[in-house]
Amino acid sequence: MAQFQDLWQKLHIEYDRFARTTSPQHRAIVTEFYQRVWEQGDIYLERQQGWYCVACEEFKDEKELLGDRKCPIHVTMPCEWRDEPNYFFRLSKYQARLEALYQERPEFIQPLSRRNEVLGFVSQGLRDFSISRVNLSWGIPVPTDPSHTLYVWFDALLGYLSALLEPGDAPTLANALAKWFPFRLHLIGKDILRFHAIYWPAMLMSAELPLPERVFGHGFLTKDGLKMGKSLGNTLDPFALVEAYGADAVRYFFLREIAFGKDGDFSEKRFVETVNADLANSLGNLLNRSLNMTHKYCGGRVPTPQTETIQTLTAPVVALARTLGDRLAPGYESLDFAGVCEGILALVTACNKLIDEVAPWKRFKEGDAAAIAELLYTVLEAARLSTYGLSPITPTLSREAYRQLGLVFPDVNSWEHTRWGILPTDTALPQPSPLFQRLPVPA
């Protein structure tokens, strides 16, 4: 647990609560939820026979298994044959309601590839699944039969509810669901999609509770085109990656380069090339050259545009910047982080091109102060908008950009900060420094 928390801190990942299913509060929530489902007649005792993957904590159909009855996900682990009495949840009872859910709310499962995967599985017919085990020394006893222990996935999925309890609240479903439920977004790995897009909504239906708005299954990561594994010696150490390149670079690459929801590949060479091109050469260069010219031509203060001298040149960039927030909002909402980055880079590229076209160094020699003021305010404000728009992905870089612009990054994020003209004129600017140091190219 401590290792996860340490990694999240290094990656600047904030969370509201770190919860464990071993807590007494969780046990109380599970017991109350179980009772609801029991009273619906959706739990019964039967004998479970089949091949069981210990790592997946799931029984597998024999047709799913690889040679030597190995799990298709945990390919080095043969499944175990289990034959024991278990309590079952009547998943099959909810086949029609689940199919209606997927039909009426096509956005419930995302992305489309994950939705199609679930539809294909459900169309084969749903079977009831086991929710208990016998002869276990740990876990939550089945309330109606303490000789059995509740087991994944019935127990684990309810951690999403028990984690919602506020400190000091009595551990009841009513208290757990009072504020944050139902979820707007439930983000999971694609390997546990079936449990979250089929088992979980059926359990909520049985307990007569509302469903999440959508379940999004993200993809897997390979390295240099190969599946990562200890046997290949090609695992990716996130601690070492952050230590070598910094959290912003790591966050940016994975959200920029891999379409969220699809599988992606990590190559150190590609990582360095992408981050250098976007954060150092494009965004960092824009801010640094703009600030240096402001110091050189405007006394180190944000200029005040005087006229419409070069309006025909700045107008396209201003129009692009004014609408940036409107274009980023749906991207963030739909988890299209790659699209968000592309939209920001389009503005950055337009600004760098504008500087080259206007050539303020020539305007300075011609004494055209008004044109320089118009240009520099445009690109400085566009740089502010770009770094603010990128702040959910690169929080440290964005705060440093604000500091160099003479601003304090807002405590509370708001789309209000994506409107044009927030950068105050005549603001004194500190001496600029490179926003993002180029990463060394790996040998």
Image (spheres, grey):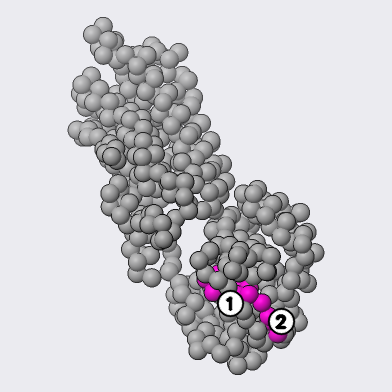
State whether residue 92 is above or below residue 307: below
Q: Quadrant of residue 350?
A: top left
Q: Quick one: 281 or 19, which is closer to the camera?
A: 281
Q: Is residue 121 left or right of residue 171?
A: right
Residue under the point 46% across and 80% down: 23
Q: Quick one: 77 or 327, which is closer to the camera?
A: 77
Q: Residues within 10 Å of mark 2 (few under 14, many from 20)?
A: many
Residue under the point 22% across and 33% down: 432
What kind of element bears circle 1?
strand
In the image, the segment drawn in magenta is 47-59
Q: Which residue is mark 2?
A: 43
**Residue 145 placed where, x, y %?**
64, 92
State whether residue 159 is above or below residue 240: below
User: What amino acid type is highlighted by mark number 1?
Assistant: Glu
Q: CA distance from mark 1 to mark 2?
A: 25 Å
User: What amino acid type is highlighted by mark number 2?
Assistant: Ile
Is 146 part of what is drawn in magenta?
no
Quadrant showing the N terminus:
bottom left
Residue under the point 75% across and 67% down: 126
**Residue 229 placed where, x, y %?**
43, 59
